[in-house]
Image: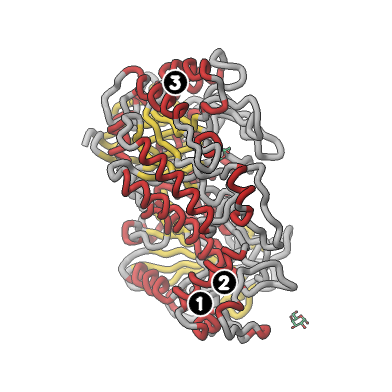
């Protein structure tokens, strides 16, 4: 469906052939006087912009009173953009309910677990389960779709905006009612719910559905399965709302693809996007760089995971930033080259469009210090010149449009349910960070120059010779069978501490950890040994472990010990194991080695799978490589991960983007990206 969208783009000022990559931004013309719009479209042409998202926060302007509509200005904007060859990803405008609505219906406002109301004054102040909100919002969606059906600028629909950005977990009475309905569907009987939630514990047995509540602020730790189910329910409630808007749009404009912008980032775990992907006609993502010392890897990981969510098909980068954001404690400007490198890293992982928040930097409002394509300084600025240069690069990359990712030999399994379950309270440690664990492995593979696909549960693991499943905490019986079959049929599974510990109800698999995977791994753990912050243990392969240790007993004769603990309470006992299983294997890493320690261990884990880097030895770790393949050929992306120059010898292919030296080697300046077409088929 993304190809439908791209083929509708006019190609911008130069009328370039379609399909091509999308380039643009959120466009908020309602913040500006009319004369600025003329300059906007002129500059959009100059930059090569061919798509913008319009109307995201326009509800109060479009419907100033319950029965008054004002579309004239948006008609003009749509017409103006179309005249200038810019397609519109039109928002349904439901992301920020207008003051008249919240005044008349305060019962649509979300409520926290402490019972506090989230008042209007910002945005996204609505309950996903509010029937009153839904009635008003869907009325607006219907008006929008009726008005703009058939408008030549309309290329896609943008449902709401970042669903769940501020209202992912609502504990209101509406939520309580909807939660009960959701639980009735899941469990049918109260007995089944009582069993799943383990309500024999702490006298929590329910005798009537009306007694069941969201996990509101309680005297002590709320029931863990209640918490886990509330996370599932909250993700489903937003998904259900997405569907409701989508159904109106499909009814009125069946040919226009529908999307919504996901937020595949470490801080936004409330929405199970792997489960949402089928609800949209193409996957769109927003990503912002948050300084962490590993932000480059995280950006790549996010783009890679988005590709996984999209099943390897092209996706749409709906927002990122040209430079600083406004919502971190200190908002850093991007350095020269970072705007292009960040953008092209997303393209390297399957983005067929590169868009920003936002087109023109606001003069007023909470985001006035957030960067944009046209900064406060205006078009005569290094930033706008960098934007225009990126537009030129994306035109050159038009042949990439429509290509999918070429599967990598290594898969990293990212599982939303384990993310949710592993980080709940009352656990052996509160220091475990599921996303960070996955990122550790990803960084280690980047350091070795080994390509990996981040995939989500349910993906075909058989495509990968080795599958790494860090902290796969929640393992239903079916998943345990799938992983066992994967290994027995020749796959190489690697997993870690705190994996295979609970089932889908968050009940322990009894008989020794990791219960669900114990036989496959050929080990048994009787007690966990988490480490306090700042404490570590040494392994006999010279690596250092933190966060966690396990008291491991090898139970199957074919289980090899790859490393032992050298210090700590388990000194002399196994720390890293591998069991030959069928024609594959299953390995277990029982402590946190961090990216560096994993990079040292990984060659031994990759070896039985016969996996190694495809890059020349000299540039491994300095360059990230990805491959896309599609109607335009096979494309090799090389991203310079360093702040120095890197020369990559021995490659053949047309250099679409990037420079070559005298000997034909690809030369990457600091933070540069090169793209080669290595085959035309
Ligand atoms: C207290 C309570 C017990 C149990 C323990 C756990 O002692 O009385 O029910 O919760 O704490 O440490
Ligand atoms: C999100 C929102 C945008 C804007 C940016 C700022 O992505 O969708 O409206 O607030 O954050 O970074």
| Residue at image coords 50%, 34% | 342
Name the spot of residue 432 as percent of width and height, x first: 63, 61
Give the distance between the C-alpha atoms of the residues marked 1 and 3, in whole angstroms.
61 Å
| Residue at image coords 52%, 17% | 36
Residue 245 visible in the picture? yes
Q: Which residue is mark 3?
A: 44
Query: Colour scheme of this structure image?
Result: secondary structure
**Is the residue 478 above or below the residue 444 in the image?**
below
Residue 615 visible in the picture? no
Name the spot of residue 127 as percent of width and height, x first: 57, 56
Give the distance between the C-alpha atoms of the residues marked 1 and 2, in whole angstroms.
10 Å
Quadrant housing residue 65? top right
Q: Which residue is mark 2?
A: 574
Query: Which is closer to the viewer, label 1 or label 3?
Result: 3
Query: Which is closer to the viewer, label 1 or label 2?
Result: 1
Quadrant of the snapshot with the C terminus = top left
Crowd rating for badge 2 (residues with CA inside 10 Å; few <14, some 14–19, many 20+) = many
Q: On the rendered structure, is 41 left or right of 654?
A: right
Name the spot of residue 369 as percent of width and height, x first: 65, 29
Mark 1 and mark 3 lie on one chain; the one further toward the N terminus is 3
Decide if ligand 1 comes within 8 Å of the CB at mark 1.
Answer: no
């Amino acid at each position: 469906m993304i190809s439908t969208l791209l083929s509708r783009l006019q190609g911008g000022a130069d009328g370039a052939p379609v399909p091509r990559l999308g380039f643009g931004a959120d466009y908020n013309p309602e913040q500006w006087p009319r004369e600025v719009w003329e300059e906007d479209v002129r500059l959009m042409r100059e930059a090569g912009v061919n798509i913008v998202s319009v109307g995201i926060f326009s509800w109060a302007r479009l419907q100033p009173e319950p029965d008054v509509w004002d579309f004239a200005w948006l008609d003009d904007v749509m017409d103006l953009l179309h005249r200038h060859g810019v397609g519109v990803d039109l928002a349904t405008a439901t992301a920020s309910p207008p003051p008249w609505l919240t005044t008349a219906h305060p019962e649509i406002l979300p409520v926290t677990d402490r019972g506090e109301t989230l008042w209007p004054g910002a945005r996204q102040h609505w309950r996903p389960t509010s029937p009153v909100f839904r009635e008003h919002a869907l009325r607006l969606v219907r008006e929008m779709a009726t008005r703009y059906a058939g408008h030549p600028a309309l290329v896609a629909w943008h449902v709401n905006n970042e669903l769940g950005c501020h209202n992912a977990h609502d504990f209101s009475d509406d939520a309580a009612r909807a939660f009960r309905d959701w639980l009735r569907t899941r469990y049918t009987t109260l007995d089944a719910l009582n069993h799943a939630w383990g309500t024999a514990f702490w006298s929590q047995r329910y005798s009537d559905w009306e007694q069941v509540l969201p996990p509101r602020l309680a005297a002590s730790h709320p029931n863990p399965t209640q918490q886990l189910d509330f996370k599932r329910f909250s993700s489903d409630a937003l998904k259900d709302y997405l569907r409701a808007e989508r159904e109106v749009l499909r009814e009125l404009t069946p040919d226009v693809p529908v999307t919504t912008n996901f937020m595949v980032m470490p801080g936004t775990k409330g929405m199970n996007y792997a489960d949402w992907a089928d609800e949209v006609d193409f996957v769109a993502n927003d990503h912002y760089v948050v300084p962490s010392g590993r932000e480059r890897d995280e950006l790549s990981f996010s783009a890679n995971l988005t590709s996984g969510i999209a099943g390897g098909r092209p996706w749409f980068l709906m927002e990122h930033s040209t430079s600083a954001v406004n919502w971190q404690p200190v908002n850093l400007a991007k350095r020269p080259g970072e705007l292009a490198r960040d953008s092209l890293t997303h393209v390297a992982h399957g983005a067929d469009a590169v868009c920003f928040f936002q087109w023109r930097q606001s003069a007023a409002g909470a985001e006035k210090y957030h960067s944009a394509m046209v900064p406060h300084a205006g078009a005569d600025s290094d930033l706008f010149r960098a934007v225009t240069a990126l537009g030129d690069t994306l035109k050159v990359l038009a042949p990439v449009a429509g290509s999918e990712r070429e599967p990598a030999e290594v898969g990293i399994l990212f599982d939303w349910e384990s993310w949710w379950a592993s980080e709940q309270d009352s656990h052996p440690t509160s220091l475990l960070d599921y996303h960070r664990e996955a990122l550790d492995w990803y960084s280690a593979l980047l350091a070795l120059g080994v390509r990996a696909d981040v995939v989500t549960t349910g993906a075909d693991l058989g495509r990968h010779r080795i599958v790494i499943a860090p902290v796969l905490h929640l393992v239903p019986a079916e998943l345990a069978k799938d992983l066992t079959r994967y290994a027995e049929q020749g796959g190489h599974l690697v997993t870690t501490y705190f994996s295979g510990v609970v089932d889908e109800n968050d009940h322990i698999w009894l008989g020794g950890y990791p219960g669900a995977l114990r036989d496959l791994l050929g080990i048994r753990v009787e007690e966990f040994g988490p480490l306090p912050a700042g404490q570590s243990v040494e392994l006999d392969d010279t690596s250092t472990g933190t966060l966690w240790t396990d008291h491991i007993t090898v139970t199957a004769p074919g289980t090899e010990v790859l490393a032992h603990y050298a210090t700590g309470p388990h000194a002399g006992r196994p720390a890293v194991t591998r069991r030959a299983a069928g024609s594959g294997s299953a390995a277990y890493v029982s402590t946190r080695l961090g990216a560096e320690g994993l990079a040292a261990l990984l060659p031994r884990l990759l070896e039985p799978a016969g996996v190694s880097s495809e890059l020349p030895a000299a540039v491994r770790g300095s360059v990230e490589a990805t491959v896309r393949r599609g109607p335009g050929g096979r494309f090799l992306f090389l991203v310079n991960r360093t702040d120095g120059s890197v020369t990559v010898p021995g490659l053949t292919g047309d250099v679409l983007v990037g420079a070559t030296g005298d000997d034909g080697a690809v030369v990457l300046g600091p933070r540069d990206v090169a793209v080669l077409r290595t085959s035309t088929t």
